[in-house]
Amino acid sequence: MTSPGELERTLRSQLRGEVDFGAAARALTTMDASNYRRVPAGVVAPRDAGDVAAALRICADAGFPVVPRGGGTSIAGQATGVGVVLDLTRHMNALVSVDPVARTAVVQPGLVLDRLRDAVRPYGLAFGPDPSTHARCTLGGMIGNNACGAHSVAWGTTADNVTELAVTAYGGSSYRLGTGWAGAPEGLRELVAGNLAVLRTGLAGGFSRRISGYGGLDALLPERGVGVARAFCGSEGTLGVVTEAVVRLVEAPRAPVLAVLGYADESAAADAAAGLLGAGPLTVEGMARDLVPGAAAAGALPRGDAWLFVEMRDEGAARSLVRGADAAHSLLVTDPAGQRALWRIREDAAGTATRTPDGGMAWPGWEDCAVPPARLGAYLREFRALLAAHGLRGTPYGHFGEGCVHVRIDFDLVTPAGIARFRSFSGELADLVVSHGGSLSGEHGDGQARAELLPRMYGPEVIALFGAYKDVWDPAGGMNPGMLVRPARLDENLRFAALPPGGGELSQGVARCVGVAKCRTTEVGGPGVMCPSYRATGEELHSTRGRARLLHEMLAGEVVTDGWRSREVAEALDLCLSCKGCRSDCPVGVDMAAYKAEFLHHHWSGRIRPPAHYLLGGLPRLLRTVALLRAAAPLNAAARRLPPPGLTRDRPLPPLARTPFTRWWRSRAGASSASAAGASSASPAFEARVRAEPGSGKGRGGESRPQGPGATAVTLWPDTFTEYLSPHTGRAAVRVLEAAGLEVTVPRGPVCCGLTYVSTGRLDRARTVLRRTLTRLEGAPDRPVVVLEPSCAAALRTDLPALLPDDPRAHRLAAAVRTFAEALEQYAPHWRPPRLDRPVAGQTHCHQHAVLGDAADRRLRERAGLTGELSGGCCGLAGNFGFEPGHHAVSVACAREQLLPSLDAARDSGPAILADGFSCRTQIAQLSPYRAHHLAELLADGLPIEGPADSP
């Protein structure tokens, strides 16, 4: 028998594409978006159809099975394999041509759906099927699963929109499939001729969402036009590999209108959905209140506890539909922005469904059963009862107009008892679906999750026909074995079984990654951050999902065998910017920054670390020493000539301030006799105003603010960046906070949030620093803690209590942290900021987006007359990341994606450049002609000039 090594050498010698049988490549493809895991022998990224044919011939000769893979977002296990995985996304991802007159496009299998949609939009066209993973799923994967999406009510499934397929079978034979027998494999015509009765009675007459098995075989009937290409769709990689497809395009509606209909409950909405189909809707989507956060529903949705989202081609059709519907309440939305906001609520439901109300995980496996729409209400009532009988929880939503229901269920897929319940529930649910005339899969395919149960849906003659159909295409059985025909058991190959028991937070975290690959989107725009390194490199290795997969395999120990010392994991995490974007943008809240810190902690334990870990990781202590020695000037001069060893030579170090913020503060506060235990005095400017304006209570513009002893006292946190690199930001914040009537104090002695130690994985050192900080603060009175640097505020809110979970002081400090805008909004609500009345451009800090939120900042900017939106994404400097060797190209690419273009686009309006993060301001200064400011600086510049009391 051929060994994997021999197979790898043969493939390398005969293919132009990449061949990788290494641990990292295999680890990245052990899982898709399902509950299953299969370890491949290797991965091949073919360059073209010739490479595909050669790979299939070589693997057949060697006896190795093959599984084609697109975006890896399949939820039933069909994109995993034990032989050779063909990665069709790396090279075979082209839009070959578009014919707007014929309304067709020629595509390669690795083309992402959104790229096709973007390309045909200028012609007023669209590709009808639109699964929720449209930003990362591929056309080849959609053909393999016969994907559908929200608009299938109007435009059908993928099979309805494919006219021709170029297919290569196991062994290397190639076929061109369309309508008619020309180009079909030998024996297929004879198989159909001998089974006409089975095709007509066992398959014909089904409803539109019957996707399960080879459910499209009835397309081969003579009265159906012998649709060989159509019948191939939905075969889940078990017959051959699609190398090219001709797809049909549809006319996109010019001004669609969204009608949102409110109902008393989910059953009422489900019962009503089928009755709306006669109006010709484009979509009929349904969800209930348990998937909609109260804040999102308030004021945005019509009254009710369940809703149907119905999209119509124009306003007249929408108004007619609303008049004829039996909804208790309704909302009609014509403007595109309002529609997008409402669709976002519906789309966010998919993320909400992955978590139970108490924060537990809900898993796929029964994600997309479908029943005839008229049966949906009755089915959902029985489905909810079945969940309750098994002690399980799940929240249905989905394509109610086609009877297709999405749901994730809180299965226990780890313990024997939980797996047994999963198996018994699956059998009973299959019987329930069949009793309503439904399909076990309504759009995602059966894979391993449901193929074992297909005999409950189809009779023995149909199952035998499926096997014969597979054998015509793949007599050797090498294409994706274990799926659809002669399948594996639904409780085999569960991915959780590979993880060690009691693996702790890291094990739970990587298991939480369900692989939906939102981190693989290349879409630019909006507030999202995840995943900047993937968008810069396009490599799965550098996506959040890819890193989670490698960590999963490291803990499993089968593919990645050197544990915490793994070079593969270290390489994958090296380009992680620790932006924390995945913490908020990932549907299941994977927190790769935290996992990277833990990995680095173990990886370098007992070893000499890279110089950057000591220089940048130990920045607070280093800069404190420089300040004590008053050596900022000579150090700046030295850094200009030669960067410190271990740091990149591609960018200069930011200069150190000659006067740290707290030195300025102490000098300024020396004029005041007031003092507070554990904290320095209130500022003299505050004291002077209290004495000069007794009882006036009036500030600029006549606004009222508290004065004297009743004023709220806040502690301004002197983070490392404000203290040593940007003290003018701290001085500006003092001016604004005082102008708002707040009493400002600053902690005595150095305090630190531990951020730089955490980001370099020096977790023991971080704990020591944080305990010392908490001790220094023990004598200070409890008061809000204002943190100007978003990354430090995020570290205090999340990393501090996570690192010191048993220290109540840590939780108190975390709860006291406020951003600059939050402090003004909460403790000076009646203060009116100066009116600046100018546009702004810049970037919301990635940690602010992910951890802190920016709602208060938006409101403060609006009150100050600062107009415009800040860009999303990550600036790319990301603390120490951009200064470390080998990171400069990715760092710059991240900045060039959103941040720098947004500044250039706003240039003509003369905006104020806003960036609260020191890294963001540094990146802007080094890569553009602009100078960015913290919001405190912009507001301070708008205040009246203070007297001498404001200067040291």
Image (cartoon, rainbow, N blue to C red):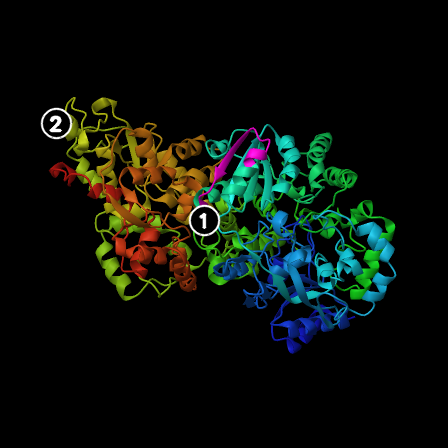
Q: Quadrant of residue 325?
A: top right
> Looking at the picture, how far across and down is residue 19, in whole percent?
62, 70
681 left or right, relative to 453: left
Q: Which residue is mark 1?
A: 528
Would residue 131 appear left or right of 725 to someone viewing this image?
A: right
Image check: 871 left or right of 242? left
Task: Classify 10 Å Cα crowding around label 2: few (below 14), some (14-19), many (20 and above).
Answer: few
**Nearer the observer, 376 or 45:** 376
Bounds of the magenta segment: 322-336
Image quadrant where one finds the N terminus: bottom right
**Does the magenta portion include 718?**
no
Residue at mark 1 to residue at mark 2: CA–CA distance: 48 Å
Residue 927 can be seen, yes or no: yes
Residue type pointed to by label 1: Gly
Which sits earlier in the primary sequence, circle 1 or circle 2?
1
**Looking at the picture, does residue 236 appear above or below residue 17?**
above
Q: Residue at x 72, y 58 (%)?
A: 235
SS of the residue under disc 2: helix
> Disc 2 residue type?
Ala
The location of residue 811, given as percent across then percent down, is 44, 32
